[in-house]
Image (cartoon, rainbow, N blue to C red):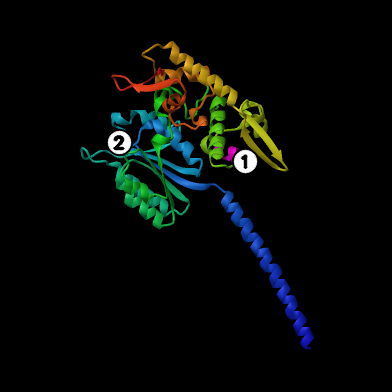
Amino acid sequence: MFDKIKKLTEGERLRRIISFAWLSFRVAETTDRSIMEDKRFALLIDADNISAKYISSILDEMTKHGITTYRRIYGDWTSTQSTKWKAELLENSLIPIQQFSNTVGKNATDSALIIDAMDILYTNNIDGFCIVSSDGDFTRLASRLRESGMMVIGMGEKKTPRSFMTACTKFTNLENLIDQDEEEEESQEIVSYSLSKEKQVINKSIIEKTIVGIITENENKDKSTGIGEIGSRLVNKYPDFDVRNYGYSLLSKFLEEGLQFNLQKSNRTITVRLKDSGKSTEELVKYIVQLVIDSGDNGIGINELSNLTHKKYSDFNIKDLGYSQFSKFAQSIEGIEVYEDMSKRKRARQFKQ
């Protein structure tokens, strides 16, 4: 009788061990899936304190964190100061929230943004917030959202008060996301979507430029780039992206025919790398040096030099070389000196010892 009970006890123990192992597997599987799923963010932009020139960089930066399910921008849309933002609203699916400036010199959008943020918080259907503003008045809001377990990403210019920066889970300086020397050129480009007139699809060169940025960013972190990550981040930034619009059925085929990418297959994993650009970089440097030499003693304006370089090398991206500003890259080239003229404009000339 005792042996029978002992056997039953051992059997029960075995069943419990198996059940526990299965439960652990399911929990791990569920955890892996939740990690792989994109987090959902509410993007709230203070149009009174942020320039429209940053919108492409803002949306691009958010693809690193997840999907922006809310895209709201706050400002007085009857004011002439919001003209540039109006052109970006439809292009980037931003919902404008009107807030009249009832008091001169007082930012009227603060309260509307804060109220909306709290309303969204209590819907319990997002994982975090991105507050884009250079205003320190949102410091308490950021702290309150973090207290509720939300991830808070802050974005603003260098003038942003440190109190707001430290209140966020992560803060990004918008001026670090764009090349300051190329603002004039970028404003002429349709960076957000660059839609062709014949077909309402994103220009292929813009897609390739985005992919190069993703790979370069990962390489700087000593991290490989899988084809799945590229596809996910492209869709996060361009919701209407589809390789079939370019005549391909697979993203891998799209990348294989690109002149800048190498695909490495290992079992079921495909890793994407950039092709060696040493030779092309050398040619680029020679071209820039020759332009500077031909410009004479007064040199050439940095903006003009940058525009000519991009015109010659359409796939050139200064960030691929590890620089955030074209002037910094030009200064690093041997034989070139970057200086400011009487109008405080940057120019490049031949350096003579």
* Residue toward you, 133 or 212: 212
Reply yes or no: does residue 277 show up in magenta: no
Q: What element carries label 1?
A: helix
Q: On the image, which quarter does residue 88 sit in?
A: top left
Q: Is mark 2 on a helix, strand or loop?
A: loop
Q: How crowded is mark 1: few (under 14 residues within 10 Å), some or many (20 or more)?
A: some
- For badge 1, the amino acid type reads Gly
Dot 2 crowding, Cα within 10 Å, few <14, some 14–19, many 20+: some
Quarter of the figure with the C terminus:
top left
* Residue visible at 39% across and 57% down in the picture: 147
Q: Provide residue 113's location: percent of width, then percent of height.
A: 34, 45
**Residue pushed farthest bottom?**
1
Picture coordinates of residue 163 (x, y %)? 32, 49
Per the rendering, the mark at residue 228 is: 1
Pick the residue in front: 168 or 100: 168
Q: Which residue is drawn at 51% across and 48% down?
A: 39
Q: Name the spot of residue 222 as percent of width and height, x first.
A: 57, 42
Report whether residue 20 is seen. yes
Measured from the top left, where is residue 286 in percent x and y? 52, 18
First-in-chain label (2 vs 1)? 2
Residue extent of the magenta highlight: 224-233
Question: Does 226 appear in magenta?
Answer: yes
**Mark linked to residue 76:** 2
Q: Is residue 206 left or right of residue 12?
A: left
Mark drawn on residue 204: none
Quarter of the image that includes the N terminus: bottom right
Residue 239 visible within the image: no
